[in-house]
Amino acid sequence: MAWIDSLSAAQIAAGVVAGEFGATEVARASLDAVECRDAEVGAFLQVSADAALEAAARIDASRAAGDPLPPLAGVPLAIKDNMNLAGTRTTCASQMLASYESVYTATCVQRMLDAGCLPIGKVNMDEFAFGSSTENSAFHPTNNPWDLERVPGGSSGGSAAAVAAGEVALSLGSDTGGSIRQPASFCGVVGMKPTYGAVSRYGVVAFGSSLDQVGPFGRTVEDVALAMNALTAPGRDPLDGTSQEFAVDFCEHLDDGVTGRRVGVVPALMEAEGLAPEVRRAVERAAAQLEQQGAQVVEVELPHLDAAIAAYYVIGPAEAFSNLARFDGIRYGYQEEDCANLAQQSALSRAHGFGREAKRRQMLGAYLLSSGVYDKYYYAAQKARTMITRDYARAFEQVDAILMPAAPRTAFKHGELSDPTQMYLSDLYTISLNIAGNGGISVPLGLGEDSGLPVSAQLVAPAFHDRELLTYARALEVAFGAAPVAPACAQKGGELA
Amino acid sequence: MALTETDVRGIAEYARIALDTDELAEMTAYLNDAVAMLDPILEYADADVEPTFHPIGDLANVVRADAADAGRSLPIDEALKDAASTRGRSFRVPSILGEGGDC
Amino acid sequence: MKELAEVLKDWEAVIGLEIHTELTTLDTKMFCGCTLSHDDEPNAHVCPVCLGLPGALPVPNERAIEYIVKAGLATNCQIQKRSMFYRKHYFYPDMAKNFQTTQGPVAFCMHGRLDLDVRGRGAAERPECAFGEGEASSLASASANAVGLSASMGEQMPEGASCGGAGELGLPERFDDGSYRVPIRILRIHMEEDAAKLNHLGGEEGRITAAAESLVDYNRCGTPLIELVTEPDLRTPEEARLFMEKLRRIFLTLGISDCSMEKGSMRCDGNVSLRRRGETALGTKTELKNLNSFKALHDGLAYEICRQAEVLEEGGVIYQETRHWEPSRKRTVVMRVKETADDYRLFPDPDLAPFDLSDEFIDRCASELPELPDAKRDRFEGAFGIKRADAEQIAGDPATAAFFEQAADGLAGKAAQVVANLIVNELAGYLKAAGASLEESGIAPTQVASLARLLAEDAISSNQAHEVFEAMAESGDDPEKIVDERGMRQVSDAGALQPIVDEVLARCADQAQQYRDGNQKVIGFLVGQCMKASRGSGNPKLFNELLRASLS
């Protein structure tokens, strides 16, 4: 029999449909892989074995009854712990929500389950998604499956690590400033941030409401396409007023190739200070490969990109302050006992419930929104947003997609980046898409020749051209090979019985 | 102009985040660093463009019908389940104007 | 303290109102599909959205937008096509998210106006000196800071907004009967969500002071709420009361709320400051809370004006503060002092797409507007020929107006006025005493029409009409049946009454002679004798005529 991690999501679903193995066997194999590998990786905060086995039993019963099976029947799924799933804890990796049990389910999670996925569990993250390393989890760090001394990236570090370790075939993450694409890059898997509005945010604990977007991780481009179908096919979500209809089949044009397509590279980004030479060379190889496959590579400019990080660290904290105001310990969440009055109870509950970075961001946001400061920063940042969006629009008059790094370097060691503002600057390549709203995808390109760790490139398309991103990603996958399971984890538990 | 500890204490009171003396000093240093990093944004304050508050293109007038969504409303045990302090069918909060406990 | 009339001779009171109205006739809340609560058990109408659970998102109620646009059209506001929802932050457990979703500098409705007709004793509150030209110099609009918003918060202010798009403060127009008409400008009407209810336990019952704990019920949290802010154009407590009454009549007619001040579905705060007559600079204002009846609104403002005058005349200072009206003690007390302006950290809500209302939407709202109270009053006065004051009272309540139109169908002049009298006196009095609504009373327009006919035909007297009305309301029987059963029908047949007249004149020869000698007054005694002899069934007017004829 096969090892669960040797199969893609597409192969698992096909195997279940064909009766090669049952969904229950898949669930058991995935749970076994978690059992055997996660003590070292630390991707999971909570394993929902019962829910996974129940979902698997329903699929097996459907098959036995001769009912048609959904497209991701029996595919093990890990869910970032900022997404509500009724009956599970949704902690956002925070003491604030350590015992918070969801009473409802996020639309994105429900759609993956409706498509046949098995909810294996909830995975680690930076607290409330504030961070790029998953070191800001209140519970435990997550280790990069490629090198356990290194971080998996963040904030969706658990989602990336669980897929890279072969514990699950698919995972969901959220991306506010690069929180899907950067950990995908660090862990050597495919990670996609769809266009803002493509995937419902209902039920996903908000960080920056105008920046957050949910997206999938997988080890193959096809798996990510299947997940995108599951997330968008039922149409726009009436519960999310910013979600939009996005009726395309993401699997349809995967193998169309890139002949005749125009791909832009941005010289200023390729020459930016802090870009590791091995990452730069990898992105250049990717450009050469696309050219070889018939694409035309041209240079484009994004002149206002220098404002993107500043704009992000205005808009993000401002929205975060507002979104996290609700955590006062009254309706849910950590509550300080024996307080003299309400103000003290709220202030101490928040002081002790939130970790350091969560408090920093909220304080920064509360300052930036205060009267007199708002005009200088928040209002200005939203104007910069207009300029950055226009930059992309102009660039996309010349090219169909833009190729750039996803992260400036490969995974760093735990504790290596301790200054928060230095950490912020490492989001240079991902942030502008959250500002402008269009989609991007991080595609693994093998291992860097200096670090021996996964390197990647990011592809960027105009808003709602996300399907094209998958075609480019597929072209690179053909050239560079699909993402392997991290060697230290492969075939460690998880045999399909 | 740099933020003082007094400024930061005021923000913390407003944001309902208690800070002890060490945390106050550290937070003040952080905020000054972070705000300095935001300098590039200042030059956009007078840019002659409309701000983009919603990155959603021309999407507007998103509404729902005035129809009950019974499936979403919560039974009382679910509504109160995650609260640390309740009484009867209500959420309980301590004295709102009670004495003491400046923080 | 001096009397209000004395104070207002020397001081000009500058009053603005903030009126909150819950859209109680909607089925669901502003941003979620929870049904609206009407006195249900605590937390029976809550969901992830209105409880502010992590991850929940708001989606606006379409009909609430329709209602506020109608409210704006009915109060002569400019409907703003483009506007946004904002988040207004303050930490308080009545807001599940610790911010209220409301609107920013641009509300759906800006710069409206209502004209007030001030009559009778209320008109006397505005002293003689307050009708002169001097008033016109005090126009300075205080609108800019009225809602604590800076103009650059992300929205272009509409044309002319900064200097009062609805024009300058207008002068009152005075009429010969002492009444006057005065235009009151409306700054804006914006859409927002109501807060949860707090129940304070321990300490002085029901008050927050010294309460040991409070219980939070989120049923009301998220109820669609519209807030109307007037320009500070009101000058007397009576004008404030009339404005509120007029607005309530309009909202009732639109059918957007039950407008119950008692239940709190319509609530009013007042801002008031004083300045010496002739001054143009505004004084320091206080904000008045707990004005939850028309009487409280009037009396609270009147007290506060007199209090401020006393403080100022004694050389004291008015502090910018929020004060609570205590109707039982007839005084206002300080709730909290505002040392600095509140910083609510408003910014456009990223979860809610902006609005860009189409002409079609606004036109449809306009086409669906019912006939408004002023127009209805004018029509009742013109088409039915009833008195203006009665027309105004009847037109102000949609159910009563519809009732009148059915009862007075096809009538005009005196006959219609009889119907109007029955509605204004008998019906209104009965409903008030019974504490019932028109609908609950079960009284039908046809019944009142029948009663009016009996009166118009002199079949019964007005005194009898009262008795018949009471019996009709209690039993549900038709007036004819009651009149017949009780033998109340007046005999208006001269042939039947003449024998009684003859008998009385024969019995009372002395009085008959007095009449013939020129004592006209004695006829009253003779009519009384006839009524007695007929056991009250004879038509007194006809007796009068027959007696005079017989004696001439």
Image (tube, coloured by chain):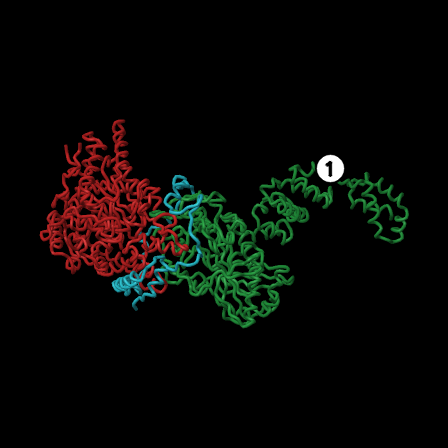
Q: Chain of mark 1?
A: C
Q: Quadrant of residue A162?
A: top left
Against A345, residue C463 (above or below) is above
Q: Is residue C53 visible?
A: yes
Q: Quadrant of residue A68?
A: top left
Does residue A324 appear left or right of residue C314 in this picture?
left
Q: Is residue A400 visible?
A: no
Identity of the residue furthest to the top in this view: A65
Residue A448 at x, y percent in the picture: 11, 51
What's under tag 1, amino acid-wise?
A: Arg
Residue C332 at x, y percent in the picture: 54, 61
Residue A89 at x, y percent in the picture: 30, 43
Against C392, residue A116 (above or below) is above
From the viewer's side, name the closer residue of C377 and C184.
Answer: C184
From the viewer's side, name the closer residue of C148 and A287.
Answer: C148
Number of callouts: 1
**Mark 1 highlights which residue?**
C486
- Of the 4 image quadrants, the one containing the N terminus of chain C is bottom right
Against A21, residue A197 (above or below) is below
From the viewer's side, name the closer residue of C457 and A309.
Answer: A309
Does residue A347 appear left or right of residue A189 in this picture?
right
Residue C226 at x, y percent in the picture: 46, 53
User: Chain A is which colour?
Assistant: red
Does residue A198 appear left or right of residue C240 in this picture?
left
- Residue at (87%, 51%) from the top-left corner? C515
- Chain coloured green: C
- Chain coloured cyan: B
